[in-house]
Image (tube, grey):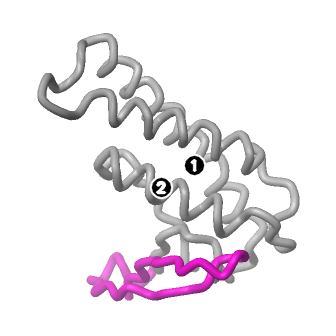
Amino acid sequence: MAERISVDFGSLTYNQLWQRGMAVVLALTGNVRFPNPPVTMAWLKSLLATFQAAIIDTQGGNQGSKKAMALRDSLRAQVISALKLVASYVQENANGDFTNTAFETYDTAKRKIGSSCRLRRFAGSTGAPIRARSCF
């Protein structure tokens, strides 16, 4: 089995999801290895900015209104869908090399036996540090 991208974005907190999305945007913007993602990085960045604003609206002293929480949750679903599309695209086009993609990966063969994970650090296309967990 080969190394695969983890698409378990639903287990991330709101802030972790936003951070992962921004890491993907930074890693794939201008990345010549992935020239035609299924969603543009500009659109994903805009969606993430709206999602971040919705997260902020639901925090604070009054914990946000039901309308604000519904918007945040709707945007969360959109972010997860977009990241899954991008992850699938990267998985198909990476030829097993996931460096500088900002996605968590795991080895499907080794994970079934038992795994331990380590955090790997990469530089994104803009030089920004990207962290990814690799499980063995």
Q: Position of residue 65 (x, y in %)?
A: 24, 14
Front-lying residue, 24 or 97: 24
Q: Nearer the viewer, mark 1 or mark 2?
A: 1
Task: Identify the residue at image location x=35%, y=35%.
Answer: 55
Q: Is residue 77 magenta?
A: no
Q: Is residue 127 magenta?
A: yes
At label 1, the amino acid type is Leu
Element assignment for label 2: loop
Task: Identify the residue at image location x=49%, y=74%.
Answer: 105
Task: Identify the residue at image location x=12%, y=29%.
Answer: 61
Which segment did they paint magenta? Answer: 109-136
Crowd tier of the residue under label 2, counting other residues whose Cα lies within 10 Å: few below 14, some 14–19, many 20 or above: some
Element assignment for label 1: helix
Say which quadrant the C terminus sits in.
bottom left
Cβ atoms at labels 1 and 2 below 8 Å apart: yes
Q: Position of residue 23 (x, y in %)?
A: 55, 64
Instruction: Identify residue for label 1.
Output: 83
Q: Quadrant of residue 24?
A: bottom right
At label 2, the amino acid type is Val
For the view shown, which residue lies furthest in the left direction? 61
Q: Position of residue 128 (x, y in %)?
A: 59, 78
Residue 7's disc is 2
